Image (cartoon, grey):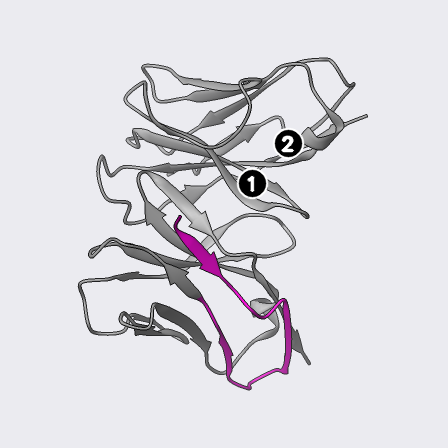
């Protein structure tokens, strides 16, 4: 069965610091998509960044970047210069067979 | 461009009743998927529709059903509600008929079963 594991239930950092959220997954597919979504208290699920498995280059979106290690099946998210608005639940997800398979989430708290 | 719209936003139902939730995707999107989010089970896939066809279904009992209309709007129905059905139900839409490049989510419907 395909699974996604996020081993950090909660993390807390000071504003402007850098934080890395971990994610590992299991799949037998060779080509696939991975995503990081953010869910603030408003509950709206917002796409942070996505990675196509066949691309070796790590995806970046402004302050957000990933470290994608295909062989290790690891997909971590790095947030640089963290801001108060980054406080949210972060979910790692793997797309397969028309569905997103989700990790349990990491609650990220940015302290002023 | 309007986002994904889910109605209603909040709902309180009694055990044994049935409920219908609605999702209007972003204009032009033909794929709609549904997820249930609970503190205990996290995010779980319910079903996905593309052009009125269900392409995949999650591991939920037959009390959970859905459909998609020709205008891509989708509804999900839960019959004989149980306390454990209390959850946030999220709908997502995308334009891609194949690989998902990005899914846009609605704000969800918070269902409480009492």
SS state under label 2: loop
Residue at screen point 32% across, 18% down: B52
What residue sits 75% from the left and 28% below the top? B83
Q: Is residue B92 above or below residue A15?
A: above
Residue A73 placement: quadrant: bottom left
How far across and how far down the image is residue A47, in percent?
Answer: 42, 55
> Which label is found at residue B53?
none
Subunit under mark 2: B
Q: What is the chain letter for disc 1?
A: B
Identify the magenta region: A1-23
Asked where in the image residue A51 lies, by quadrant, the reply is bottom left
Secondary structure of the residue carrying numbered label 1: loop
Q: Are marks 1 and 2 in contact (CB under 8 Å)?
A: yes
Q: Residue tagged by mark 1?
A: B107
Residue assigned mark 2: B9
Disc 1 versus disc 2: distance between alpha carbons? 8 Å
Which residue lies at the image location 45% right of the left edge and 35% below the top edge?
A: B4
Mark 1 vs mark 2: same chain?
yes
- Residue B32 at x, y = what percent? 38, 31
Q: Residues within 10 Å of mark 1 (few under 14, many from 20)?
A: many
Q: Residues within 10 Å of mark 2 (few under 14, many from 20)?
A: some
């Amino acid at each position: 069965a395909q699974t996604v594991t996020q081993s950090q239930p909660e993390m807390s950092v000071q504003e402007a610091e850098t934080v890395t959220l971990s994610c590992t997954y299991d799949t037998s597919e060779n080509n696939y998509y991975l995503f990081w979504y953010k869910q603030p208290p408003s509950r709206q699920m917002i796409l942070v960044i996505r990675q196509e498995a066949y691309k070796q280059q790590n995806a970046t979106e402004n302050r957000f970047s990933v470290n994608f290690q295909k062989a290790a099946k690891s997909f971590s998210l790095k947030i640089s210069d963290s801001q108060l608005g980054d406080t949210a639940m972060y979910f790692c997800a793997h797309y397969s067979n028309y569905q997103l398979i989700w990790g349990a989430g990491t609650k990220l708290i940015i302290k002023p | 461009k309007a986002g994904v719209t889910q109605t209603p936003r909040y709902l309180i139902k009694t055990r044994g009743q049935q409920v219908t939730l609605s999702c209007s995707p972003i204009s032009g999107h033909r794929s709609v998927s549904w997820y249930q989010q609970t503190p205990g089970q996290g995010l779980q896939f319910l079903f996905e529709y593309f052009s009125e066809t269900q392409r995949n279904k999650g591991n939920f009992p037959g009390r959970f059903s859905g459909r998609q209309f020709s205008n891509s709007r989708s509804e999900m129905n839960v019959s004989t509600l149980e306390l454990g059905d209390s959850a946030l139900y999220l709908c997502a839409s995308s334009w891609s008929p194949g690989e998902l490049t990005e899914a846009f989510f609605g704000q969800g419907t918070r269902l409480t079963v009492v």
